[in-house]
Structures are given as structure tokens and as C-alpha cells.
Amino acid sequence: MKFPILTFVLILPLFAQPQADVKQRAKTARDLGKQGEDAAPRLAAYVTDPDLSVRLEAVKSLDQIGGPKTVDLLVRATRDNDPEIQIRATDGLVNAYIPGYIKGGISGTIQRVGNSVKAKFTDTNDQIVDAYVEVRPEVIEALGRLATGGASLESRANACRALGILRGRAAAPQLIEALHSKDDQVMYESLIALQKISDPSAGPGVVFLLRDLNSKVQIAAIETAGLLKTSEAAPALRDVLDRARDAKVKRAALASLAMIGDPADRGIFLKYLADSDDAIRTAAAEGLGRIKNQGDRTAIDRAFTDERRMNARLSLAFAEVSMGNLDTGEFSPLRYLVNTLNLKSYQKVASAYLVELARDQNVRQAIYPLLMGATKDEKLQLGVVLAMSGDADSVSYLQSLQADSDPDVAKEGIRDLRTLRARLP
């Protein structure tokens, strides 16, 4: 009886020692996260530690540190076969380019039971890096690999989301592949990412989802086809419009046809211009504005005068300006769009219309004089418009915003000028 007991007593310290070492390594990895960016390189060994708990602490510390010095190790962590580490590494990579992202990323919602990892996705997904931000190619490559080969559906969906935020155009093929995952969240995140990346060549790859049985995925696919101006989608969109029983699907289908702006759909837009649904009227006016058939000017003028719903009236103002009405008088359509930049509820709508319109130099020339007497909100939003749609003729106007007496306007003016210059040849 004494021999087995003696054996147990001798073996116990040998067993306990590795466990104590693991705990110490995990603690060291955790403590390094509190020491700032200079400690990031010292986490290298812990990112590839044989023990999962140590690797998790290492990635958490990298996320806590943030900044460019963490990028190489986070890219390495994306190759880990654990889904939680993949999710945390993904959020950390986005955080390196958008400081503070980690607080709202899905890694904060992770629930782990053994090897099973669950995370909660929100529908709020409007973040995107500025156009002048250069994301390292190896980051996009790593996220593209996760989008199609992540250890869990959550890690794949999160990688798709990250690719959109980081404008990962090089990973568009992986996002298209992710659309065939048959998982609703992965497909949805991939569609939103493709919208943000805005690569028209990806458009044909979403057409097969225009009749998806999940309405959330279907609507996202319909919107993506429109935003990417996918002419190949037009026949399917017309069919969806005719057959849709869901009002949201019908609105999305007409709005996408309006984005594509095929003259063949002029009759459809004229038909719906007086519809009882103001969202339908909005899409119809947009479509006519993009087709630019001067024969529709009278109908648009009358509708603009009579319309009382804000969204529809803004779309009619867009159509008026698009068709050549560049008057800037007090009650003119262009002035109406600019004035609406002061209304928080409709600011984004008016700004989006102006971004599209300002691609035309004639429209920009009409906008420039309005900057002189513009309000703070108008200056802020028009700066964004010129940054996204301006040309060399816009530089001096953004420089004037950069020198504005209001510090907020001046700060955004610097950012807008950087965005514009990143776009110019």
C-alpha cells in the first residue's frame, strides 16, 4: 500500500509544474498588455504558445495595446485554428486602423463553452476607413483567407465585416466566394462589405442572391446590385419588382433599378412617380434623374412643387439638378439640397445626392459660391462632398475650409483635402 502512495507523491510535483508554468505564461502575456506599444514585440512567443489560454491572453493584450506595432503579430494570430483568437485578431487589425473599434467589435460579445464560440452581430455597420488610409496588403490577405476558411461561421462573418471596413478590394474574390457559404450572417456581411468596397466588377457575383429566401439577405443583395450598378441584374430586379409581396423588397428592387438607371426602365419610373408609397416615389424620381430624359422635366417640376414628404422631395430635387437645373435661388432644388444639410435626420440623404451630383463639374461650379455664406453644418458636409467627388478645381475650396475660423470645420477640411488628393491622379 505504501508503494502506490509514494509513487503518487513523487508524480504530483511533476504534473503540477507544467500547469503552474502555463499560468505564469498566461499572466505574463496578460501583464504585457498594460505596458503600452513598446511591449508588443515581446508578445511574439506567446501568440504561438502551445497552450490556448496563453495565446488568448496574448491576442487580448495586442488588442489592448493597439496601433501599428501590433499588426504583424495579429496577422500571425489570424492563422490560429481557434475561432475566438481569429475573431479577436480580426477586431484588433481593424482597431489598428480605426482606434477605438475594439470597444464595439464583436469580440466583446464572445461567449465560449469549451471549443464552441458564439458572438453577437449588430446591424450597425457603417464604419469605413478614410479613402487616404493605406491598409497593408498582408492584412487584407489574412482577412480574405479567414472570410472563406475561418474556424467558425462567426469568425468568417467577422472577417467579411472587417474587409468592408478596411476597403479590402483585393479580397473581393473571397467575399464573392463567401456568398456561397449558405450561412445568412456570412452572406449578409459579405454583401455589406462589397457595398463599401464598391468594385463594380463584383456585381455579377451577387445576382444569384436576388431571390434569396431570407429577406434580409435578399434585400442586401438587391441593394448591392444597385450600388454596384450591375446591369446584368436588371432583368431579375424587374421580375422581383413585379412579384414582390414584401413592401421592403419591392422598394429595394425599384431603388436598385434607379441606381442602375437603364433608359429601358423609364416607363417603370414614370408609372411609380405618383405612387402612394413615398419610398416608391423616391426611387422613381431617382431613376428619372439618372436617365436624364429632358421630356420628363415637366413631370419632375410638377412633382417637386407638389411633394410634401421629405425623402421624396429630396429625390425630386436630385432629379431636377441632375437634369440641368443649376439655379441656386432661395427656393431652387439645389439650394434645397444644400439647406437640408442642416437637418440631422436628412443630412446623409442630401449629402449622398450631392456627392453623386458633384461629379459633374457644372454642378460643382454652382456649389462653390454657396460655400461663402454656408453654415457650419453645410461647410462640414460640402467638404465631404468635394472630397469624394471633387477634382483639381476643388482644391482651393477645401483649402479655404482648412483655414476656417471654426476649429471643427478646419479639422475636417484637412481630412477632406487629404481624401481628395488621394483620389487625384
Image (tube, rainbow, N blue to C red):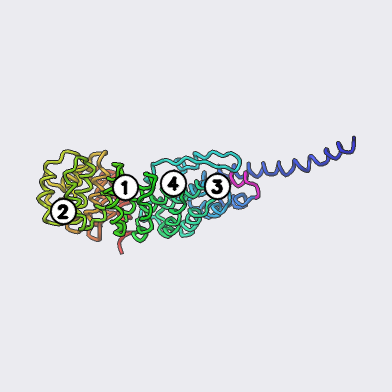
Q: Write down the region rendered in magenta.
A: 50-59
Res 411 label: 1
Which residue is located at x 16 percent, y 50 percent?
270
How would you classify the magenta stretch by its main secondary structure? helix
Query: Real-space Cα distance between discs 1 and 2?
Result: 25 Å
Q: Residue 197's spot in the image, x, y percent? A: 37, 55
Gap between marks 3 and 2 measured at Cα: 53 Å
Judged by depth in the image, the label closer to the viewer, 4 or 3, is 4
Q: Is residue 53 magenta?
A: yes
Q: Residues within 10 Å of mark 1 (few under 14, many from 20)?
A: some
| SS under mark 3 | helix
Residue located beneath label 2 in the image? 366
Please state which of the two labelled residues, at mark 1 or mark 2, is closer to the viewer. Answer: 2
Q: Quadrant of the C terminus?
A: bottom left
Give the camera-side residue of 357 and 378.
Answer: 357
Contact, mark 4 vs mark 3 (Cβ under 8 Å): no
Q: Amino acid at mark 3?
A: Pro
